[in-house]
Image (spheres, rainbow, N blue to C red):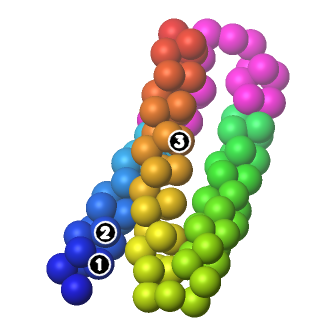
Amino acid sequence: MLKRVCLESRERESAAVVGRTEDAFRVALASWDQEPPFRTKARANFDASVETFRRHRAAQGELHASLSAGGNAASDRRLLCAIELNEQRATQLQNEMGALK
């Protein structure tokens, strides 16, 4: 039970980091030194990528859960997948923000 609580806590924190990083990315895009049409297009593409990432994370989590073949580890595998993808996404966005400066 303790492991599950830790995984749930870690997943919530990793999702919060992604959310804060997405917010920071939006701020960076708004102050990006490019003409407004480019900023607008980049913002629309970013918003689309956020939604695509969320769908991918959910689908990938379900894949990982299904690989437990109905075992007790399904929910743990789903959480571990989400944590890994959240950490990758936050790093990716932080790296891309560096290119906006």
Q: Over which residues does the magenta segment extend?
A: 23-42
Q: Mark 3 points at which residue?
A: 89
Mark 2 vs mark 3: in front: 2
Among the 4 quarters of the image, the one containing residue 58: bottom right
Q: In this view, does 89 lie to the left or right of 9?
A: right
CA–CA distance in space, label 1 to label 2: 5 Å
Q: Do we see residue 23 in this rendering?
A: no
Q: Name the residue under label 1.
A: 4
Q: Position of residue 22 (x, y in %)?
A: 51, 42
Label 1 to label 3: alpha-carbon separation: 23 Å
Residue 87 is situated, as x and y percent measured from the top left of the image, at 43, 44
Q: Which residue lies at the image location 29% right of the left edge and 78% below the top edge?
A: 4
Q: Please say if the residues under marks 1 and 2 sit with CB atoms less than 8 Å apart.
A: yes
Residue at 80% from the left image edge and 30% from the top image edge: 41
In the image shown, does 63 or 82 lie closer to the viewer?
63
Q: In this view, does 47 lie above or below 71?
A: above
Q: Which amino acid type is shown beneath numbered disc 3?
A: Arg
Q: Give the left or right position of residue 71, taking residue 17 as reference.
A: right
Q: Report the number of numbered marks.
A: 3
Q: Are marks 1 and 3 in contact (CB under 8 Å)?
A: no
Residue 73 locus on image (x, y percent): 44, 80
- Residue at position x 74%, y 13% from top? 35
**Mark 1, mark 3: which one is toward the viewer?**
1
63 versus 17 height, above or below: below
Residue at 50% x, 88% y is 71
